[in-house]
Each structure stands twice: as structure tokens, then as C-alpha cells.
Amino acid sequence: MTVGILCYASVGGSGIIATELGKLLAARGHHVHVFSAEPPVRLTDYQAGLSFHRVETPAYPLFREPQYLLSLANKVVEVASQDPFDLLHAHYAIPHATAAYLARQVLLANPATRAPKVVTTLHGTDITLLGADPSYRDIVAFSISQSDGITTVSESLKADTRTNLGITAPIDVIPNFVDCQFYRRREVPGLRARLGLDGRRVLIHVSNFRPVKRPAAVIDVFAAVRRDVPATLLMVGDGPELAGAVHRARELGVAADVQFLGIQEQVVSLLSLADVFVLTSTQESFGLAALEAMACGVPVVASRVGGVPEVVQDAVNGFLHHVDDLAGMAASCRRILTDDDLRARLSDAARRTADGQFCDGKVVPEYERCYERVLAGA
Ligand code: GMT
């Protein structure tokens, strides 16, 4: 199949899944074109069958803002004239579902070109935060319902899509995935010592530090743990809440034991040092960062929100708590860090969960089957 993938390139789960899917589809013999404003973070090496198209948004004095939606749809139409698409796959509804719809309408109107089918994958905040906002709602709901196939990354997000946007069309739940060969525990010799972690337990948090992730709450959890356990917290990522998290660490007197490592493209070496992954989000349709940690054998302590319980099973591969129960999260971290048997049991279960349900080899064929159904008009 010739597939066009429309996605955000910035650090974020939807862009990561879109890019990894593109690479794996190309490896399975499909022709894949990835469209984004900049090269996606995980698209680094040349790969046969995979090309990247940068969406330029030329400035003009009359425009107060870049015209990304128009440029993206136009770019898709332009590329389609060279390599006609069987299918466009929009990741994150705003505005990718709309751009895919628009591009398809343009191609449909031209008898010399083939009109592609459209699949939209909903990732989370496109539905739970932005999609329901009256500023976007009607167009987002329309664009999604015009797609030939709709997928969500969890059952929870499917329910939110029905409730928030009133979408009644069939929705397939296709969970997020990891490359299980790549995401596995493998400690880089000497790294633990270089980070000053010898003899210490290690907590880790990885995110884009947006308000929904509540990184300052991760610091609160850590400060409570740190009172009893010699431990270090690795904070990986960057975003608008970083300054608040740094401030909170100073305020609680734990700054010396928190390392803010900024954006790291490869987190396996860091996850491989960790004993527990902390996720205090107020909303999380899936929690890809938690899954990446679990694949590296790191148990997760998280808020019981959205699709997180579909990934993290309480007392099996981590612990779940009410979003406001930071003391409970700290108590669970303390248990994991101080009970070697429990930690080993949860760690094995975390890896088994990733292996059993969320490996690329299992999930990517689900997308292929979805494409085939859509192309067959089923
Ligand atoms: O978490 C974010 O704010 C980024 C966002 C994205 O689209 O990049 O993440 C959402 O999609 C990820 C991939 O499907 C999910 O793993 C995240 O849970 C989801 N984030 C939220 O629902 C807050």
C-alpha cells in the first residue's frame, strides 16, 4: 500500500507512534510518506520505502498565524500527483483529520488522480482537552466522522470520543506499542556511576512537561519517598511546567537529589537504571512513556486516569492511585524501592505485559488489518 502519515513531529506520544508505525510499515514493504512541520524526532536514518515531507508555512504580512492546515493538505495533494496514495493516516485529530479530509476532497475532484481512503487515529488531548472545546468541536467531530476508519489508543479514549464528540461511527481500539527488541533493560556500563547513582534507588519521570503531566506533583511524591529512602529522581523532558518543577524541588529541599536531564532522544539507557517510573498525570489516554518504562522492566506508579489502567495493572506491574492521592503514590514507591522481592516481581510482570500485549510485532499488523478493511470498504 502507499500510505501518507500526517503527524506532529514534536516530542509527544502521537508523533512517536506515527513515526514508528511509518518505519515499521516501510520495513514490511509498504510505501510510506510522512508529513510534518519538521522531521519527527524518531525519524533519523534513511530507510527504503519511507520518505519525509516537510510542511512549509510561508509567512505573509496579512496572516497573523501560519497556515499549517492548508499547507499540509496542499503538500499531500502535491505528493499524491507523484505517488498516488491508497490511504492517508491522520494522527491526532487537530488538524490532521481535517487536512486529510480536505486533501481527499481535492483529489476526489480531479478525475486524473486517485482519491485515498482516510484513517484517523485519536491519541488523547485531541479529544479530552481540545476536541471538546467549542472553538474546535464541530469541525473536529465532522472531520473524524468523515474518516473511513477511526481508531483510538484505548477503550477509555473510545468512550471519551463518543461522549465528548458524539461520534457514533465504528471505532477500533488499537493500543500503542513499543519496539520490544529495542525497548528492553540494558544498562550502559559506567552510566550509573557517571550520574552518581551508585548505592541509591532511582525514580524516573519522562514527559513533555505539559500541565496535564503535573511534573511538580512528581517532585512532591519524590520528596515524601526521599525522607526514608536514599534515592535520586531523574526528570527527563522539557516543557512549560519545567520551571515549576525545578522550583518545587528547591522549595521541598530535595533539589540536590533531583536531576533534570532535559529532552533525551533515547531513554532506554536511563530507564534501565530506574527502579520505578512515576506518572502523576491528570489525564492520560494511554501513557506511552509508562509502557516504554515497563518494556525496560520498570514498574509504574501512576494516577488511575483515562487509559492508564489498560496498561498498568494495580499490584501486578505497578500501582495505581487516585489522582489526588500523592501520599499513596509515595507509599507505593517506598514499597517498591525497599522490598527487593516485590520490585523483582513487578519488574518481571511489567516486561511480560509489554511483551504479551504491546509489542510492535503484534500491534502493527492490527493497523494493516484496519487499512485492509477500510480499503475493502468494509
Ligand atoms: O501527552 C501528551 O500531551 C502528548 C500526546 C500526544 O498526542 O503526543 O499524548 C497523547 O497521546 C499518546 C500517544 O497515543 C498517549 O500515550 C498519551 O497518553 C496521550 N496524552 C494524554 O492523553 C494526555
Image (tube, rainbow, N blue to C red):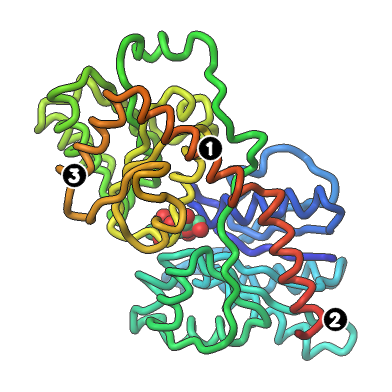
Q: Which residue is labeled 3 in the image?
A: 328
Neighbor class of circle 3 (other Cα within 10 Å; few <14, some 14-19, many 20+) is some
Q: Which residue is labeled 2 in the image?
A: 114
Q: Which residue is labeled 1 in the image?
A: 351
Q: CA distance from mark 1 to mark 2?
A: 44 Å
Mark 3 or mark 2, which has the lower sequence index? 2
Amino acid carrying label 2: it is Arg
Neighbor class of circle 2 (other Cα within 10 Å; few <14, some 14-19, many 20+) is some
Q: Quadrant of the C terminus?
A: bottom right
At 69% from the left edge and 53% from the top edge, which residue is drawn? 362
At 74% from the left edge and 59% from the top edge, which residue is drawn? 365
Q: Is mark 1 within 8 Å of ligand 1?
A: no
User: Which secondary structure, mark 1?
Assistant: helix
Q: Position of residue 300 (x, y in %)?
A: 38, 41
131 vs 245, left or right, is right
Q: Position of residue 109 (x, y in %)?
A: 78, 91
Mark 3 or mark 1, which has the lower sequence index? 3
Rendering quadrant holding ligand 1 = bottom left
The part of the image, by quadrant, that contains residue 228 is: top left
Q: Is residue 263 visible?
A: yes
Question: Height in image: 8 above or below 355?
Answer: below
Amino acid carrying label 1: it is Arg
**238 and 283: which is toward the camera:** 283
Mark 1 or mark 2, which has the lower sequence index? 2
**319 and 177: which is toward the camera:** 319
